[in-house]
Amino acid sequence: MKNRRDQSPETIVDHWTEYFNNGNLERLLDMYHEEATLLPTFLSKVLSTREQIEDYFRKVAKDHNAKHFPEKIEDHLDKDDEGKRIVYVMPESSVDVLLSTSLLKSIKEKYPDYNLYFATKLQYYHILQGNPYIHKVIPYNPQFDSALYLEGAGDKKGFFEIAFTPHITTQRVNNYIHNCKDLIDKKRLCTF
């Protein structure tokens, strides 16, 4: 396409739109000359290499998919452990994720018959790789900031029996709320 001069601008735009909308990144990139420059109207910088143009379109597609096709938590949970799941949520900070691993052994000892899921952002998965106490690492979603979303409340069934969300008090706001199924000795929580 990039070497053809016999095509009208309308045809080129139609092909570009078709490739973009169908997610055909390779054909889309082939429409650009190797020395092409792309200046998206809402970016402050020029994209002047094929890699920059490809990265730009990948980001646009990723943002679009995240907005219009959000991941469902059910897609990351095993079907055979319903009613026997615990989640530990620590979305970010490599230090916070690493420090959290020191608690996992005691959680598994307290709840030996439950599968322990760990929710974090994808860039921290490698920190948790091979941890013997984690059943599965799942991608963090902002909805996980609500223990009631994770555990359920009223008529709404939750995904986990217990949700540990320490990031709420360390990375968000002070909050301690559960559905009263945890085995934490609340008398020892008071330090004054």
Image (spheres, rainbow, N blue to C red):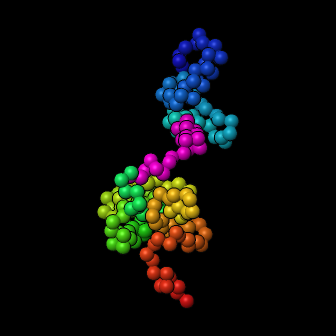
Whether residue 140 is visible, yes or no, is yes
- Seen as rendered, the residue at the extreme bottom is 192
Depicted 71 relative to depicted 124: above or below: above
Towards the viewer: 76 or 37: 76
Left or right, 144 with respect to 11, comes to left
Q: Position of residue 139 (x, y in %)?
A: 47, 53
Q: Quadrant of residue 107?
A: bottom left
Q: Which segment is the magenta one?
A: 56-78
Write the residue at 57% across / 29% down. 21
Q: Position of residue 191 (x, y in %)?
A: 52, 87
Towards the viewer: 147 or 98: 147
- Seen as rendered, the residue at the extreme front is 155
Q: Position of residue 20 (x, y in %)?
A: 56, 29
Write the residue at 59% across / 44% down. 67
Q: Is residue 172 magenta?
A: no
Whether residue 149 is visible, yes or no, is no
